[in-house]
Amino acid sequence: MTDLLILLILLLMGAQFGIALTATVIVHPILVMAKKTTAIEVFKPFFDKTHIWVLVLSIIVTLLALAYSLMTGNWWWFGISIIMHLNGPYTIFFMMPLNRRLMDKNVNPLSEQTASDIQKWGGLHLVRTVLNGLVFVVFILLTISGI
């Protein structure tokens, strides 16, 4: 049963990191290169879909890590999963104002503010990607080391 929990944690954390990495290295560069109107048209549905999945995946990973920790007494798994949730306050304080402007139904896709926000979004999102990547790597290291 514990092996199944580890497998699920790794798969779901890998999926979450994959979403974040895709946003940072593929979607953001496309948004920056696209026409301003196209960038907003792409950003809105992308954001709508991904932010929900990332939230759901992070909750499931944490619940699985909690179950693993309760079953084994190894609290590293749960502790590392909690670190992943530092993305929450970071997002609320640093990314949410920008996300709200970009998601506003009256956003002017041709404004300099919108162009600036799309540019800044990539750098802000990189922090989330790195944190997710670190958590994923630590989960892999825990698996390899048998901790």
Image: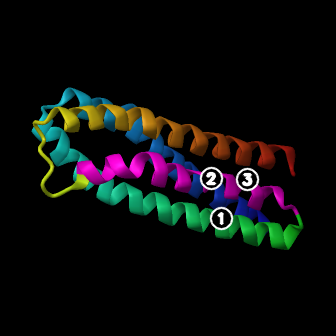
**SS at mark 1?**
helix
- Percent coordinates x, y for residue 41 in the rendering: 15, 47
Q: Residue at x 68, y 68 (%)?
A: 64
**Is 53 on the left or on the right of 111, as rendered?**
right
**SS at mark 2?**
helix
> Amino acid type of disc 1?
Thr
What's the distance in space between the residues labelled 3 and 2, CA to CA? 7 Å
> Amino acid type of disc 3?
Ile
**Marks 3 & 2, CB-CB < 8 Å contact:** yes
- Percent coordinates x, y for residue 2 in the rendering: 78, 67
Return the mark for residue 39. Answer: none
Q: Which residue is mark 3?
A: 80
- The answer to which quarter of the image holds residue 35 is top left
Residue 37 counted in the magenta span: no
**Marks 1 & 2, CB-CB < 8 Å contact:** yes
- Given residues 70 and 4, the one toward you in this image is 70
**SS at mark 3?**
helix
Q: Which residue is mark 1?
A: 62
State which region is magenta.
74-102
Q: Residue at x 38, y 34 (%)?
A: 122
- Given residues 136 and 146, the one toward you in this image is 136
Question: For the residues carrying marks 1 and 2, which lies nearer the camera in this image?
Answer: 2
Q: Residue at x 12, y 54 (%)?
A: 106
What's the distance in space between the residues labelled 3 and 1, CA to CA? 9 Å
| Badge 3 or badge 1: first in the primary sequence | 1
Q: Which residue is mark 2?
A: 84
Relative vertical location of residue 87 with respect to residue 65 in this rendering, above or below: above
Q: Residues within 10 Å of mark 3 (few under 14, many from 20)?
A: some
Q: Residue at x 40, y 63 (%)?
A: 52
